[in-house]
Image (cartoon, helix red, strand yellow):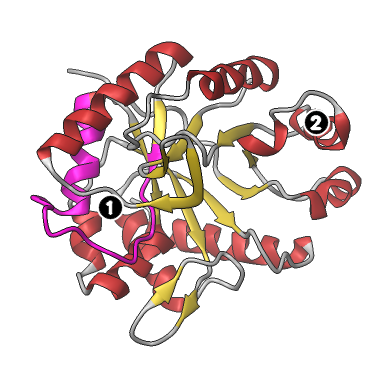
Amino acid sequence: MPTSPQLPALGFGLGLRKEHYTTILETAPDVDWFEVLTENYLVAGGKPRYYLDQIRERYPVVMHGVSLSIGGSDALNMDYLQQDKELAQQIQPHWISDHLCWTGLNGHNAHDLLPLPYTGEALKHVVERVEKAQDFLGRRMLLENVSSYVTYTDSEMSEWEFISAIAEQADCLILLDVNNIYVSSVNHEFDPLDYLHGIPTDRVQQYHIAGHSDYTDYAIDTHDAEIIQPVWDLYAQAVQRFDNVSTMIERDDNIPELPVLLAELDKAREIAAKYQP
């Protein structure tokens, strides 16, 4: 029987943010692991690397990037991948993730995570690039579903069919952002449970759960607020479908004191304990 491609789960983690560096070192909070934003630590030395080195001696870490542009039409950025690989060699993350998107054109960075058309041509393009990136890094990558605000008339399949096919064909893993599923379901009027049930159970390595801005008939993925109940409910559904997946609370703006995020992390633990098979 073939073995699962998944890596051992890490439990319940937080995104590592500079506002919490000293609190983490002084109080040793009950966090199983931290996710670090790759781009914040590519430069050797300085305070960010000093604190990261201190924290990773106490906690497992994973790397999460925003610049790979795995779906872009520009050549794969091998300089960025080299920096990625060197940082991984130094801090020994349990895994590396980035986003299923494109981020620019002709060398210009849009500084946004832009959605792809879900076509066979785009699928083949992304699979080839993921395989090349994984070969270079010497490890499987995780790809995260992004929130989106537009769709393409050329799309031939659903987003969940697209990301599932990439994971299977490129032999990579999935970072399932539950909040992004919810945001996109509001914007594009699909049932988020269809998304969950369309994802292969043996490819999901990590969850993101976060807050967003809700404008009734559309939503924007802002990562600057508390997690709302519908997202918690969707997380509970994910926990019931996928076995023992590492969970992370994501907050990128309006960063609160660490205890606020620890309380959200405790809620995730409670939901997992209640619903996990």
Residue 80 is one of the magenta-drawn residues: no
Q: Is residue 103 left or right of residue 11?
A: left
Mark 2 lies on a secondary structure that is helix
In the image, is residue 197 above or below residue 121?
A: below
Residue behind mark 1: 241
In the picture as drawn, the residue positioned furthest to the front comes out as: 106
Q: Is residue 195 left or right of residue 11?
A: left
Q: Quadrant of the N terminus?
A: top left
Image spot of residue 34 (x, y percent): 65, 41
Circle nearer the viewer, 2 or 1: 2
Residue behind mark 2: 49
Please give the label number shown on residue 155.
none
Stretch in magenta? 143-169
Q: Is residue 223 left or right of residue 43?
A: left
Image spot of residue 254 (x, y percent): 70, 69
| Towards the viewer: 249 or 138 | 138
Task: Give the residue displayed 38% in from the left and 52% down from the top.
Answer: 114
Task: Give the residue displayed 54% in from the left and 38% down from the top.
Answer: 65
Mark 1 lies on a secondary structure that is helix
In the figure, residue 7 lies in which quadrant?
Answer: top left
| Towards the viewer: 241 or 126 | 126
| Towards the viewer: 223 or 260 | 223
Residue 165 is one of the magenta-drawn residues: yes
In the image, is residue 140 above or below residue 71?
A: above
On the question of residue 244 being in view, the answer is no
Residue type, numbered disc 1: Arg
Task: Give the residue displayed 41% in from the left and 75% down from the top.
Answer: 219
In the figure, residue 195 lies in which quadrant?
Answer: bottom left
Image spot of residue 228 (x, y percent): 49, 76
The total of numbered circles placed on residues is 2
Residue type, numbered disc 2: Arg
Q: Residues within 10 Å of mark 2 (few under 14, many from 20)?
A: some
